[in-house]
Image (cartoon, helix red, strand yellow):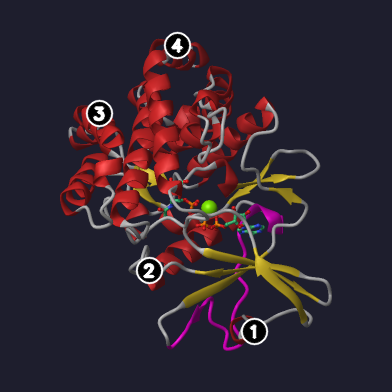
Amino acid sequence: MEHIYRQFQLDGLPVSCTRYGSGHINQTYLLVTSRPHLYVLQGLNTSVFKNIPGLMNNLIAVTDHLRKNTDDPRRALQLVPTLSGQPYLACENGEYWRLYEFVLDSLCLNRAETVEDLYQSGVAFGQFQNQLADFPAETLTETIPHFHDTPDRYRLFREAIAADKAGRLKDVQAEVDAYLAYEKEADALMSLCRSGELPLRVTHNDTKLNNVMLDAATRTPLCVIDLDTVMPGLAANDFGDSIRFGASTAAEDEEDLSKVEMSLELFEAFASGFLSACGSRLTAREIETLPWGAKLMTLECGVRFLTDHLNGDVYFHISRPGLNLVRCRTQLKLVQDMDKKWDEMNAVIRKLTK
Ligand code: ADP
Ligand code: GN1
Ligand code: MG
């Protein structure tokens, strides 16, 4: 990694550079110098992101915007420039690298340790939405076209089934059939957007709990990270992706499906934090359709995992064979559990906005 990090303006001499975090897309390293000064070094995934200069422009504009409201360096991601003063490194071999200041004295959780943690992550994503309400959406590059277009995800799923590139279809027919049975629901939110009933807003689009930094002492929000997919989108999808990941009683890659449920207690905690931070900005229709965001983001993510399994694991990082299949099963279990709890999920939202 030395040839990469020595091209950035470092404070001190590099002491260690080790793989870090549990993101599924980029290559992330913790870089520590002799000062000591901590950095996060990231290699961007060029097969996922086709327009990295556009993506980096989004990131710079969004973080500049977030910094307008605060003097606290921990409240917005901060890029460290290269030796030649560029905000990121574009290598001759086509790789792109960026360096962030490490958000100090923070927590980044893969699992809420308390119900309050999930409440606070709801506050973080609600605030994020609030802070970007006056951001000029038309200046953003769409970094992944059709990112949360669930019907389009089904189209790609059908293509993967037809191609059966990795020869795995015969082993996963049950999962394929179960997901195809849900296809009729895939357009529920997109159709409301097309008809003008739901507005497009500047959204994060990847609102996993591990994309929020909490203050280690107070466990309250510092900032939202992983801004690669900030684009115009639906508020319900930001809400929903957080529920998919954070309100599950088990990890995304849990093999024992009896442990996987969508916890109504965690659902309420996140909803309560999210609505307290951004509820007044949302229309009644947006609020009413939040449970759909939860169901569709979970369904869509499951379809994406299964598509990737069929394609031979070319998109999401996997640490063991079959991991995308395991992930698609947990998402399916969550969708089925949401079906069972549908009336209660809707009742929670009504109760919180009474
Ligand atoms: P990916 O797109 O692969 O998920 P992320 O940008 O989310 O990449 O980074 C992966 C992980 O690295 C995060 O979940 C977090 O633990 C850690 N991380 C990223 N940026 C920072 C930062 N500035 N300070 C501290 N930790 C960070
Ligand atoms: C990826 O980058 P990361 O790990 O935060 C993915 C999300 C999925 C998520 C599933 C750019 O998020 O869309 O919901 O994995 N990000 C991208 O865990 O595809
Ligand atoms: Mg991430």
Percent from the top left, x then y, of residue 82?
59, 82
Quote the CA–CA distance across marks 4 and 3.
20 Å
The amino acid at mark 4 is Glu
Taking the magenta stretch, the answer to whether it contains residue 83 is yes
Answer with mark 1 or mark 3, whichever residue precedes in sequence: 1
Apparent side of residue 18 relative to residue 349 in the rendered image (left or right): right
**Of circles 4 and 1, which is in front?**
1
Q: Could you tell me the amino acid type at mark 1? A: Glu
Tag of residue 54 = 2
Choose the circle earlier in sequence order: 4 or 1.
Answer: 1
Quarter that holds the N terminus: bottom right
Cβ–Cβ under 8 Å for marks 1 and 3: no
Q: Which residue is mark 4?
A: 344
Which residue is rendered at x = 39% and y = 14% of the image? 340
Q: Give the CA distance from mark 4 to mark 1.
A: 53 Å
* Mark number displayed over residue 2: 1
